[in-house]
Amino acid sequence: QLAQRLDHSEAWLLIQHMHLILAELFVQQASDDTGDLNDAIPGGLDFMVSRGVDSSQSLSDMIGMCAEQLLQEMVLRLGRASGERERGVLLLALNLLIPVGLQAGTLEDGPVSCSALGVGSALNSAGLVGTNAQLQAYID
C-alpha cells in the first residue's frame, strides 16, 4: 500500500490531500444529471472515516481544514475547464461547496454534517444571513 511505503497512515494521507478529495466529491456531485451520484459526498466521507479520518469532523470542519487549498483547486479547475458544460459543473460545485464551508461553526444546532444535508437537499439563503454579516464585516 502507498501509505505503508510512505510510512504514514491512510488517514494522514487523506488529510494531507483533503482539498483534492473534497474538490472531486463536490464536482462529482455537481456533474450528476441522473441522480445516481446523490450520495457522492456522503459516500466519500464515509470512505475517509473508514480509513481512519476522525468521524467527529463535520463536512464544514473538513472544508475549514483546507479551505484555502480547496478554493485554489476549484479556481484552477474552473480556469482549465474546456467547454460550457464543464464550466457549468464547476460553478455548480462551487455553489454547493461555499454555503457548506461558510457554515463552519455558525449554526446554533451545531455544525453541518453530511447527514444534515440529506440527499437532494438544498441550503436556503436564510441560513446564511449571520455568515454573510460576518463575511461583510471581514471585508469592510
Image (cartoon, grey):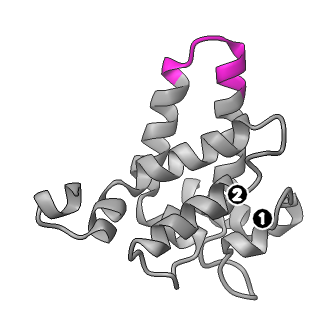
Residue farthest bottom in this picture: 109
Rate crowding at label 2 as few (under 14), some (14 to 19) or many (20 or more) other CA atoms within 10 Å. Answer: some
Q: Is residue 94 visible?
A: no
Residue 96 position in % (x across, y down) = 71, 49
The kind of residue tagged 1 is Leu
Rate crowding at label 1 as few (under 14), some (14 to 19) or many (20 or more) other CA atoms within 10 Å. Answer: some
The kind of residue tagged 2 is Pro
In the picture, the quarter occupied by the C terminus is bottom right
Task: Report the span colored magenta.
Answer: 79-88
Give the residue pinned by disc 2: 99
Give the residue pinned by disc 1: 128
Instruction: Residue 96: say if magenta.
Output: no
Residue drawn at the location 33% of the way across and 70% of the way down: 11
Residue 44 position in % (x across, y down) = 56, 59
Residue 107 position in % (x across, y down) = 72, 80
Residue farthest front in this picture: 1
The CA distance from mark 1 to mark 2 is 7 Å
Residue drawn at the location 43% of the way across and 40% of the way down: 72
Locate residue 58: give its quadrant: bottom right
Q: Secondary structure at mark 2?
A: helix
Residue drawn at the location 43% of the way across and 51% of the way down: 19
Q: Is residue 90 left or right of residue 16?
A: right
Q: Is residue 67 left or right of residue 133?
A: left
Q: Are marks 1 and 2 in contact (CB under 8 Å)?
A: yes
